[in-house]
Image (tube, rainbow, N blue to C red):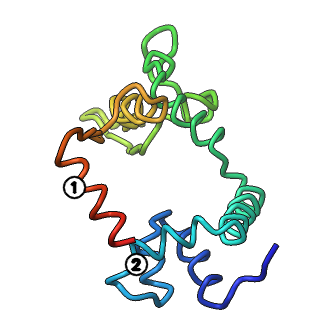
Amino acid sequence: MRGLTPKQAKFVGEYLIDLNATQAAIRAGYSAKTADRIGAQLLGKTWVASAVAERMTARERRTEVTQDRVLLELARLAFFDPRRLLNDDGTPKQVTELDDDTAAAIAGMKVRTVASADGTTATVTEYKIADKGQAITNAMRHLGMFSDRLDVNLVGPLAERLARARARNG
């Protein structure tokens, strides 16, 4: 594997931030005018792509955040059943009684003590649940069930003119 120049090494580090080649090129010190082209060219170089892959693999090992783990967490949210927050008699379970899948779906909670007129107190626990709809949408997007992108295939004279223009401009 070829060694990276300091600028290419900076690009690799910047690319890992948001996986945006254009912005990574700009942050690495390349011209904003040519950053889109330079970013794509850098990712096309085998030694740069290898460096990116190595750094991603190292990060996955270090953080234990992998695509599989993220997808499993997304599934926990998407398929959460709120009935698992309750005991058989309908009273809310204590946090310590929740199984891991149920606890993972909790985005927040409030615990407060409420006093009644006769002096007795009760503990009230309110659970805020993660957005199930958003989790399902993200899972569907990951699985390719729908896309936010519009793919346009041009044919005819306009397509030919665009192809010639691209060839001219490199």
Residue beneath label 1, please?
161
| Residue 109 picture location, percent across and down | 41, 43
Residue 46 is drawn in which quadrant?
bottom right
What residue type is disc 2 on?
A: Ala
Question: Which secondary structure, mark 2?
Answer: helix
Disc number lying in front (1 or 2): 1
What residue type is disc 1 on?
A: Arg
* Frontmost residue, 87 versus 103: 103
- Sooner in the amino-acid sequence: mark 1 or mark 2: 2
Q: Is residue 111 visible?
A: no
* Frontmost residue, 113 versus 103: 103
Residue beneath label 2, please?
35
Question: Which secondary structure, mark 1?
Answer: helix
**Mark 1 vs 2: CB contact within 8 A:** no
Residue drawn at the location 33% of the way across and 40% of the way down: 114
| Residue 43 against residue 150 in the figure, above or below | below
Residue extending furthest right?
1
Residue drawn at the location 34% of the way across and 84% of the way down: 32
Residue 34 is drawn in which quadrant?
bottom left
Residue drawn at the location 56% of the way across and 79% of the way down: 11
